[in-house]
């Protein structure tokens, strides 16, 4: 099932501010790992609750509006759709990545999330290499240009998921999005189970 659910801006701002305030002390030594480790601890608490249930898997394809935007372009520009298709050529990579994020295990979560994100990056770049000759003919460009474009897309997508995909955020594409929401530093997680 593909669906998207917007997150209200005030909720994003409030959660980001709370996340930063709670994690300030831990962030002094190693900001990225300390913040993520603290959030994984909060996610682990949610996953350990007797009443916590993993919601059914749902995906929006490539999150952040990528699949949705691609579909809009394809719907409005027939030449775009004929040349590149109605969905991103790497969308299957995103669905595999979403599956890892949906389940989002907190145990070894920092390493598992990094592995999933690197897998997404590699899959997108591999898709470019596999389809380079075909897309080069369609676009009338050298195959190397297609490969470079896919590698750039892979790097941008990797950076985006590393920045915005951590656990216990209000974003529907967060690590562990199939579980009820959590907030680092607060004892009572909110009910949720919403995902892309």
Image: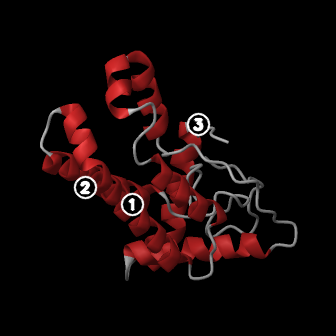
Determine the residue positioned at 53% across, 45% down. Answer: 61
Marks 3 and 2: which is nearer the front? 2
Q: Nearer the viewer, residue 101 or 48?
A: 101
Q: Earlier in the sequence, mark 1 or mark 2?
A: 1
Q: Is 145 rendered above or below residue 158? A: above
The image shows residue 180 at horizontal and vertical percentages of 73, 59
Evaluate if marks 3 and 1 touch, with contact meaning CB atoms under 8 Å apart. no
Q: Which residue is mark 2?
A: 151
Q: Is residue 167 above or below residue 130?
A: below
Marks 3 and 1, the one that precedes in the sequence? 3
User: In the image, what residue occupies the spot 46% across and 55% down?
Assistant: 93
Q: State how far apart marks 3 and 1 are (Cα).
A: 27 Å
The residue that disc 1 covers is: 123
Where does the image place residue 161, in percent across and percent down from the top left? Answer: 43, 57
Q: Mark 3 and 2 residues: CB-CB less than 8 Å, in contact?
A: no
> 10 Å neighbourhood of mark 1: few (<14), some, or many (≥20)?
many
Q: Is residue 143 visible?
A: yes
**Alpha-carbon distance for marks 3 and 2?**
29 Å
Quadrant in which the N terminus appears: top right
Marks 3, 1: nearer the viewer: 1
Q: CA distance from mark 1 to mark 2?
A: 10 Å
Residue found at x 45% / y 30%:
86
Residue 69 picture location, percent across and down: 43, 31
Q: Is residue 157 rendered to the left or right of residue 171?
A: left
Indicate left or right for 56 with 67 as reference.
Answer: right
Instruction: Quadrant for residue 141, please give it.
Output: top left
User: Looking at the image, is mark 3 or mark 2 earlier in the sequence?
Assistant: 3
- Between residue 25 and residue 195, name the one nearer to us: 195
Which residue, given by chain and number where applicable, does mark 3 sit on? Answer: 6
């Amino acid at each position: 099932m593909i669906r998207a659910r917007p997150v209200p801006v005030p909720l994003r701002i409030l959660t980001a501010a709370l996340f930063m305030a709670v994690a300030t002390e831990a962030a002094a030594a190693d900001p990225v790992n300390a913040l993520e480790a603290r959030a994984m601890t909060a996610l682990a608490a949610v996953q350990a609750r007797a009443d916590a249930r993993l919601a059914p898997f749902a995906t929006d394809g490539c999150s952040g509006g990528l699949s949705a935007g691609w579909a809009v372009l394809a719907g409005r520009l027939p030449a775009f759709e004929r040349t590149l298709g109605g969905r991103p050529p790497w969308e299957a990579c995103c669905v595999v990545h979403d599956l890892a994020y949906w389940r989002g295990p907190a145990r070894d979560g920092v390493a598992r999330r990094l592995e999933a994100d690197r897998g997404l990056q590699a899959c997108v770049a591999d898709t470019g290499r596999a389809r380079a000759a075909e897309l080069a003919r369609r676009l009338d460009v050298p195959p190397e240009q297609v490969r470079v474009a896919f590698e750039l897309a892979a790097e941008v997508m990797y950076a985006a998921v590393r920045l915005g995909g951590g656990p216990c955020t209000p974003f529907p594409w967060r690590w562990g999005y199939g579980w009820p929401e959590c907030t680092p530093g607060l004892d009572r997680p909110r009910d949720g189970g919403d995902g892309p």
